Amino acid sequence: MSSISLKLGYKYLRSNKGGGFSFTTLLAIIGLAIGISSLIVVTSVMNGFEKELEDRILGVIPHSVITSDNPISNYENIITNIKKNSEVIDASPYINIQAIVSSSYDTRGISVIGIDPNIEKNMSIISDYMLIGNLNSIEKDNSIIIGSLLAANIGAYVGDQINITTSDIKTSIIGSYPRSVNLEIVGIYELKTEIDQFLTFISHQTAQKLKNINNDETISIRLKTTNLFDADLISQNVLNDFNNNSYSYSSWKNTHGTLFEAIQFEKLLISLMLFLIVGVASILVLSTVVMTVKSKEREIGILLTLGASNKQIILIFFTQGLLVSLIGIFVGIILGFILIFNLNNFINFIEYLLGRNLLDAYFINYFPYHIDSLQILIICLISFLISLTASLVPSFRVVKLNPVQILRHE
């Protein structure tokens, strides 16, 4: 009898006139497919944006910075000891100076970073995004590398001289005034993030002169950790090895942590909203099974009279709901992957029709995507459970039917 239940459940998927699915069944399948594909596309795109942000922003800013109340002396020995920590990939001297850059065109606030260009290639991705010049160019005295947006904003280019004014005060016989220096632009980078507007690079030696510190001193030490999300714990372990309370640390979470928290929260909210589509589709599954139960009451009465158990009758309509759910989810997965792999082609087509770039205001000019298999599995599993629950509710309604009452009117 169980095999008959499965066969009847499959038969009730089809239209009474034969051929394809019934109209209500088709609606339920389409609704589930749209919900699943939307979830797959949106979560994959948001994963892609999150990964791009992680690679481009956290690939440039320090994972963590060790600082002290006073300039750090003999920093090379300290860096050598820090590198002994297995959770630290590399470490380098790091001087961050807040300044104002001036050109004949405009004035902007910037961050001037003093780095060792030979070590920086291991510390960040900036060398991979140089439009003009290379990191080693800043080894030249009084030279600087700036971002493409900053160059456009101040109307400067490679070879031009720009004035950098820091907040440090210089005192002479004529009085006290902010320290200022003219630097030559020797390179331009482009990350296509907001970093391009304010982050500039000079050599560590030039930064030492601006901060008026000795050659064996630095302001802070930059760490690159094996796991950037454990940067706080790793930094604390490094400080514990110092046995010196004058040192402290600041990780990327202090400067950019809220950005990634916002992305995670936004991803959660959008996923919950899209699951409402799956919920609506589940209601369609429920409606399909309810309408089938109502229209097949005569057949149910006959089967009950012939000795079919309540369990066997429930299995008929449960099978119907199960098949609708599986077909809808399968079609949704296929549709979702088709949309993901052709998303940029679709965007390019829309831009062609509109005659403008839709992504000019964003830090990348394409839709990145990152397919997380576990995430897609969870989406499908939750959607399947919701749809399955929706199909079970009307299936158990069959138990309340009285075959005598049904067949009395036949």
Image (cartoon, grey):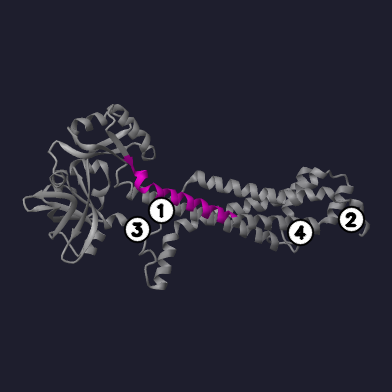
Calculate the distance from the C-alpha at mark 1 to the C-alpha at mark 2.
Answer: 59 Å
Q: Foreground residue, 368 or 151?
A: 151
* Element on which disc 1 rests: helix
Residue 128 position within the rendered picture, expressed as x and y whole percent measured from the top left: 25, 50
Residue identifier under label 4: 291
Assess whether residue 41 is covered by the magenta stretch. no
Residue 12, image quadrant = bottom right
**Looking at the picture, does residue 327 appear above or below residue 106?**
above
Q: Secondary structure at mark 3?
A: loop
The residue singled out by tag 2 in the image is 406
**Left or right of 232: which side holds 274?**
right
Q: Which residues are magenta?
A: 250-275
Q: CA distance from mark 4 to mark 2?
A: 16 Å
| Residue to which mark 3 is pinned | 363
Q: In whole angstroms, how far apart are the C-alphas of marks 2 and 3?
A: 66 Å
Q: CA distance from mark 4 to mark 3?
A: 51 Å
Q: Earlier in the sequence, mark 2 or mark 3?
A: 3
Of circles 2 and 3, the one toward us is 3
How many C-alpha atoms fall within 10 Å of the one at disc 1: few (<14), some, or many (≥20)? many
